[in-house]
Amino acid sequence: MVALTPEMQELFKATKHFAFATASKDGEPNVVPIGMAIMMDPETIWIGDQFFKRTLANVKENPRVALLVWTSGAPGCLKLKGDVTLVQKGPDYERMYRMVKERKPNLECKGLLIMKVTEVYDCRSGPDAGKRLL
């Protein structure tokens, strides 16, 4: 695992929507827009499952994921890679369920993906595009 730097954490906090990428065990890619990604600590991102279909099937087969962190209101663009664990009951799931309800009362959280960040890359255009940062 790696820990996001304070600057990376600020960019994450400024981001409202993320691109979340998964792949099947055979490598078939899938990417979806998400809004319910919460940094619990510099190494851990919680992602709520409200609508996942192919995403959920993919993480059950292949727990490696990528999350794009980017906003036009702040400089920078990060690609976070990591491993996820699916949680559908217990205190962590219940906590995420409440967080989803607080943000969007009409949504039902069906599960929680706990992402442990393993790699961070620069995804801005320019000479450092694709450079591993952590």
Image (cartoon, rainbow, N blue to C red):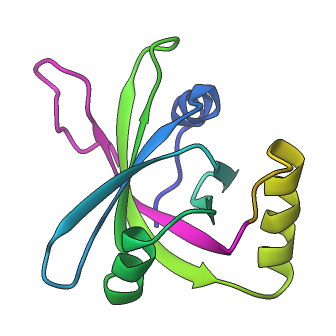
Q: Nearer the viewer, residue 54 or 10?
A: 54
Q: Nearer the viewer, residue 117 or 97?
A: 97
Quadrant of the image occupied by residue 51: bottom right
Give the answer, above or below, for where 11 lies relative to 5: above
Look at the image and say whether residue 26 sits in the magenta stretch. no
Q: Residue at x 51, y 67 (%)?
A: 116
The answer to whether residue 58 of the structure is visible from this angle is yes
Q: Residue at x 36, y 65 (%)?
A: 65
Q: Position of residue 27 (x, y in %)?
A: 14, 75
Please state if 125 lies on the left or on the right of 12 as rendered: left
Q: Position of residue 44 (x, y in %)?
A: 60, 61
Give the answer, above or below, for where 56 lies relative to 45: below
The answer to whether residue 63 of the structure is visible from this angle is no
Give the answer, above or below, for where 124 lies relative to 25: above
Q: Position of residue 60 (x, y in %)?
A: 41, 87
Please state if 34 lies on the left or on the right of 30 as rendered: right
Q: Residue at x 56, y 35 (%)?
A: 12
Q: Position of residue 128 (x, y in %)?
A: 16, 26
Q: Nearer the viewer, residue 115 or 110?
A: 110
Please state if 37 lies on the left or on the right of 92 as rendered: left
First to last magenta residue range = 109-134
